[in-house]
Image (spheres, rainbow, N blue to C red):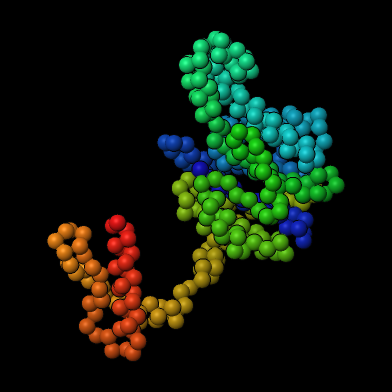
Amino acid sequence: MTLCVAAYSPKYRTFVTVSDLLLSNDYMSAETSSMKINPLSPSGRWVCMFAGSPSIYSSVLKRIRRHLHAADESGASVRAAAENAFREELNHEIEGKLLSPFGLTRKQFLEQGRNYFGDEQFTRVLYELNAINLNTQFIIAGFDSDGSPNLFSVVDPGISEDHLSLGFHAIGSGSPRCVGALFGTYDSGLSIVDLIYRLCEAKFLGESAMGVGKKTLVDVFSSDGIHQGLVPDLVEPIRAIWQKEGLPPMPASARDEISRSLHTIGWTKVGSDVGDLEIGASDTALDEPGIKEVMQKNSEELNRLTKTGRS
């Protein structure tokens, strides 16, 4: 439960990331100073964000860095390191939680488990094995040594998905609302300042989801590995401006239209059963030309929908 989002600006060859600082589990949550974004290497050209278990994230992050220690920082190498690290951690979870009481590794179980357990118990354990997930998602963004951008995610069971063609991606419980907002506001030609604002706006909207914290961290970086950012205290003035000026007010004409068209409806009993009710317009003053006819059509449609819902 969290919200992390990253977007790429092709025009300015820069990544912008925004994340909350809330850590939570099944029983509690707390705003912290723990960042959900970390560099993958000293070059600063690659970052990793997570949504899920902090302990799983820490372990996978260490594994990725070990894989990259002896490899270049190309997109292919980083993606392979992330997938392998995720799968190694998943394997570690499976062996620790499920197979360690039997003294078996995952490889030994798959190769010899049927002979060891018999068909029935082997099938049961295999079902439990397949149900184990890390339940932690990752966004990885960064640049090859030649400056080529990369944006992808890694999810259970260790599969990566590219998001560079879309230009942005979000993970965590607030991601549906966040992504929905960005589909309407993201543009590859936005300035960095505008892109920061749009990502902050999408994050603010995503806070309506359970488990998304109010504190917001912004990180901006390009292929030179130099990072700029906004700490939570500096994001709050942006939130205040967005709340005051960014949310579109209701047009007066829409308010007038709703007030003009809204009418009273009444339920009329038309049969002996409890559900034998029919909606109809019960307004007595329908003086404006055309409104009575519209009200009647509206009532008929409401009546049709309620009958469909009961059937």
Asked if residue 41 is positioned above or below residue 295 in the image, the reply reads above
Q: Position of residue 228 (x, y in %)?
A: 71, 52
Q: Say how many tags the image has.
A: 0
Quadrant of the rendered image containing residue 136: top right
Q: Residue at x 40, y 80 (%)?
A: 257
Q: Residue at x 49, y 39 (%)?
A: 24
Q: Is residue 294 visible?
A: yes
Q: Position of residue 195 (x, y in %)?
A: 66, 60
Asked if residue 282 is positioned above or below residue 6 in the image, the reply reads below
Say whether residue 191 is left or right of residue 126: right
Q: Position of residue 30 (x, y in %)?
A: 48, 41
Asked if residue 150 is positioned above or below residue 234 in the image, the reply reads above
Q: Residue at x 60, y 59 (%)?
A: 182
Asked if residue 170 is positioned above or below residue 180 in the image, the reply reads above
Say whether residue 138 is left or right of residue 256: right
Of the 4 image quadrants, the one containing the C terminus is bottom left
